[in-house]
Image (cartoon, coloured by chain):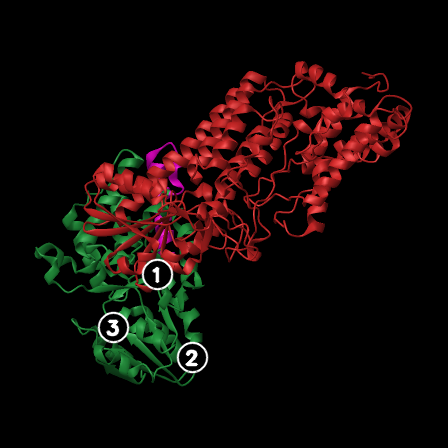
Chain colours: A green, B red
Amino acid sequence: MEWPKMTTLRLVEYFRTQVRQDPEVPSAVAAIRTLLEFLKRDQSETILGLRENLTQTIRRLEEADSSVAVSSGGELFLRFISLTSLEHPDLSQCKKVMVERGELFLKKISLSRSKVAKLCHTFIKDGAKILTHSSSRVVLKVLESAAADKKRFTVYVTESQPDSAGRQMADKLQNLNIPVTVVLDAAVGYIMEKVDLVIVGAEGVVESGGIINKIGTYQLAVCSKAHNKPFYVVAESFKFVRLYPLNQQDVPERFKYKADTLKAVEDLAEEHPMIDYTPPSLITLLFTDLGVLTPSAVSDELIKLYL
Amino acid sequence: MADCGEPDGPGNKDDITRSKNEGKELTKEEKQRLRKQKKHQKKQKERKNEKGPSETEKDKTPVSLLPPPQPVATQKAPSALPAPASAPIPVPASAPFHSSPAPSPADKPAKSKAELKAERRARQETDRAAKQPGSSSSGIKTKVPLSELNPVVKRLPEHVQVDDPAVVKRLAKKLERQQTLPYGASNKIPLRSDYGYKVSLFSHLHQYSRKAPLTQLLSIPSTVIHPSIVRLGLQYSQGIVAGSNARSVALLHAFKQVIRDYTTPPNEELSRDLVNKLKPYISFLNQCRPLSASMGNAIKYIKKEISNIPSQCKEEEAKTKLLTCIDRYIEEKIVLAAKAISKYAIEKISDGDVILVYGYSSLVNNILCEAFEKSRKFRVIVVDSRPRLEGREALRRLVQRGISCTYVLISALSYILPEVSKVFLGAHALLANGYVMSRVGTSQIALVARTYNVPVLVCCETYKFCERVQTDSFVSNELDDPDDLMVTRKGKTQLENWQDVSSLGLLNLVYDVTPPDFVDLVITDLGMIPCTSVPVVLRVKNLDQ
């Protein structure tokens, strides 16, 4: 069947519709769905050409949405489908196998969020006070399952400027009838002695076991370490990315700012970065669909995933 | 020489000694065969009791270590000479050690002076008795048959315990059984004696003097050790070849020469015999300077390659195959690995960086030169320390390329560190628990860098990863010549007579271990990994093999 080839514009459009239609879906999943569509319609003659096109597509999607998750999800998708398909001599056969594996991958990762929630909610004890940062759908899912488990707890959410994402999180939590308070970003040190544990999401998990998340997470981690409060991270496995930042400056520019800012602004030194890097020494545990991991185990998992 | 007492001749001995030297590679059939041969040998010994002097006994001991026929004939003649000629004084009996390919470089026992004397006396006794045939042959029997009839080589423990005489004695006995040479002690690998007072915490390690290299004690011509190995040993002990990569490459080249000059003796298989030939060389090199982890891994690889040679393979073919294997190993594990590491490391070097390096690491130097070629703008601070002052070599090479450098001694470290943005360190070995073994002073640098929040990057090829676990620098280390610590300024050498002061010890450590908490990143040819992931890489490597 002759599908029309996807141009860049159509790609990005497709991606954006995906995100708009289902705001709950992780951006990486939307990206992978887009890639799958592209794969179905791709017309290259060789496997190498196919891979080239897919890599290019991932670049295009990154330009549309500069989050780390899109980049990591895309790369994992590529690895997952190309690990097997090289035996068949016929290209269309290969493509069929790749598409099948792609669908499988997609199905697996759609379930990852619930897996994470199932693992994590047991760590929330009755009467706990939880501090979280900005708006994360995974954390929301965790708190949802904890509430469904008839646990009573209160939540403090940081406001998380510059986009006040924390307030949206607070609204969603109120809809679940969970008592919630919004605190200023600057009040993290003040509130830390009251809370029992800190749970944050992640946009990306790096090779060292550290995380890349909304700006303000690093402060939160340092404060919780100083107060000896456990700092938990919840993230799906497709967010594991092959970066290794040594410090804040080492995070690549393309992740630090929103996609539009990157294109529009010339001198990035004036811009405020949207994300920061939290080193593994400050993280207690990571909850992923691969299990509950310590930061040093992340590298093992990455080696298994990527090598 | 009376060969008549032994109808089977060398063939029997070959089997036994071959199996004996193989140690753990014995199969069931081999063991059965060995047992039969042992019984046969016993009977023959009893028959020989009435005949021949002891020299013939010694001549008939393990054939697998016999060099080509001509020297044998000439050697047999001198051994018939009166006792004094065959009892050289400074050299004790059974020195060669079984060099287990295990990465631990500490595989060498030593005997105390009293034991050496006792052995020498015993040998003199036997030689004197040999002149009166039959009278004390029973006395000699106890030593020689014991070594011949013991089929299985016991592995020597990995720990060095020079200060425990009981352990030393036990090891000495095991060594004797492991390798006995056909002619007098002058041709055995001599034992190197320790030098000077050893600090009590490190008394379990060897401490040698550079002024007494092992090669001085070897007789000329030394038919046991190949000349290129003798040269290599001398280069190691004098510090001419230093640095783990350089030592491994030199070792592999020397082994290539050995393989080229090797001819399989009749009734022997190349795959087994060559491995046995290499053992005394490795023991010799170990005595000249303890083996490094990289050398240990290289030796493991070579031994594996040699034993994997099929028996039908012709000698010439086998030799070329081995030579290409070695070349490929050097190419892949050292040269190409360096390129891969440079590629990753260059990503971590940004413009305006101030990079601190310590001592001379060939790999780190390579990285910096490559980065400079890719027009990264950075400057380097070279930290150096006595007594080796290796940093000067690094400084020279970097400046030649045009990289702007600063040179400090390690005592100025906390002064210079606030300026530094990254620290690049080389490694001698990476241990299985994530600890980094490197030149002494490295853990110092990592510690201070950590307190200043400066990222520490360790660059190490995967062939230096070893399965050993160590949490401190005492358990296994190397003691260099203590005389190196003496320095002459304005004509005066302060520590000149340090040996006379009984309570004074000079400690010249070579290596130390850095815990993984101080290391931020390890760059290997497989990629960038955290220090705690070393065992994963080891696991992956073992799966590959």
Q: Nearer the viewer, residue A244 or A233?
A: A244
Q: Is B130 placed above or below A62 here?
A: above
Residue B269 in the image: state x and y as whole percent. Answer: 65, 23
Question: Would you call the spot at circle 3 few (<14 residues within 10 Å), some (14-19), or many (20 or more)?
Answer: many
Residue drawn 21% across the image and 78% down it: A186
Which residue bears the numbered disc 1? B448
Is A86 drawn above or below residue A35 in the view shown?
Answer: above
Q: Is residue A87 visible?
A: no
Q: Which residues are magenta?
A: A83-110
| Cα separation between marks 1 and 2 | 49 Å
Locate the N terminus of chain A by quadrant.
top left
| Residue drawn 23% across the image and 37% down it | B401
By secondary structure, the bulk of the magenta-drawn segment is best described as helix
**Which one is earlier in the sequence, the residue at label 2 or at label 3?**
3
Look at mark 3 in the image and give the residue it sits on: A134
Q: Which residue is mark 2?
A: A149
Q: Nearer the viewer, residue B1 or A260?
A: B1
Percent across and percent down for residue B311 are 63, 22
Residue neighbourhood size for the residue with mark 1, other residues' Cα within 10 Å, grouped as few (<14), some (14–19), many (≥20): some
Residue type, numbered disc 1: Val
Label 1, secondary structure: give it.
Answer: helix
Q: Viewed as shown, does residue B502 lie left or right of B63?
A: left
Distance between mark 2 and mark 3 Cα atoms = 24 Å
